[in-house]
Image (spheres, helix red, strand yellow):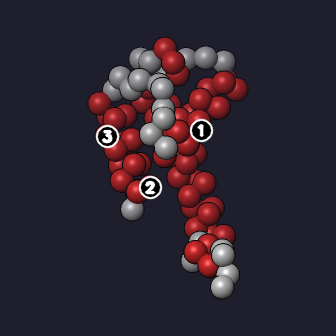
Amino acid sequence: MDAWIFMKPLTVGLWLTIGAFFIFTGFVVWVLEHRANKEFQCPTTLQVVTTLWFSFLTLVFAHRENLISNLTRFVVIIWLFVVLV
């Protein structure tokens, strides 16, 4: 028995797609929130880290940033649906 058999369907293309969606979702959340939300207003390098960190923490339901825009909440709900499926 191979302990890593569950990884077989996960191809390199799928991993790259998942990574691209992490970056894309983080960017969309940043674009929608950075004007109104103080937690998304910081130096450029910290903004990139916050954006990627938010996308990752959404997966484990541990994000601490409050979302102000309803459109951002909708994007995050779609992101959660895609990730959970």
x, y (%) of residue 31?
A: 48, 31
CB under 8 Å between callouts 2 and 3? no
How many C-alpha atoms fall within 10 Å of the one at disc 2: few (<14), some, or many (≥20)?
A: few
3D distance between C-alphas at marks 1 and 2: 15 Å
How many C-alpha atoms fall within 10 Å of the one at disc 1: few (<14), some, or many (≥20)?
A: some
How many C-alpha atoms fall within 10 Å of the one at disc 3: few (<14), some, or many (≥20)?
A: few
Helix, strand or loop at mark 2: helix
Amino acid type, mark 3 = Phe
9 or 69, nearer to the observer: 9
- Residue at label 3? 74
Amino acid type, mark 1 = Leu
Q: Quadrant of the N terminus?
A: bottom right
- Residue at label 2? 83
Farthest-out residue, right:
45
Question: In the rendered image, is residue 55 in sight?
Answer: no
Amino acid type, mark 2 = Val
3D distance between C-alphas at marks 2 and 3: 14 Å
User: Could you tell me which residue is drawn at 66 percent across and 74 percent down?
Assistant: 4
Q: Nearer the viewer, mark 2 or mark 3?
A: 2
Which image quadrant is residue 85 in? bottom left
Which image quadrant is residue 52 in? top right
x, y (%) of residue 17?
A: 57, 61
3D distance between C-alphas at marks 1 and 3: 18 Å
Relative to 63, say whether 36 is above or below. above
x, y (%) of residue 35?
A: 45, 19
- Residue at label 1? 52
Q: Earlier in the sequence, mark 1 or mark 2?
A: 1
x, y (%) of residue 44?
A: 67, 23
Farthest-out residue, top:
38
10 or 24, nearer to the observer: 10
Farthest-out residue, bottom:
1
Relative to 11, say whether 59 is above or below. above
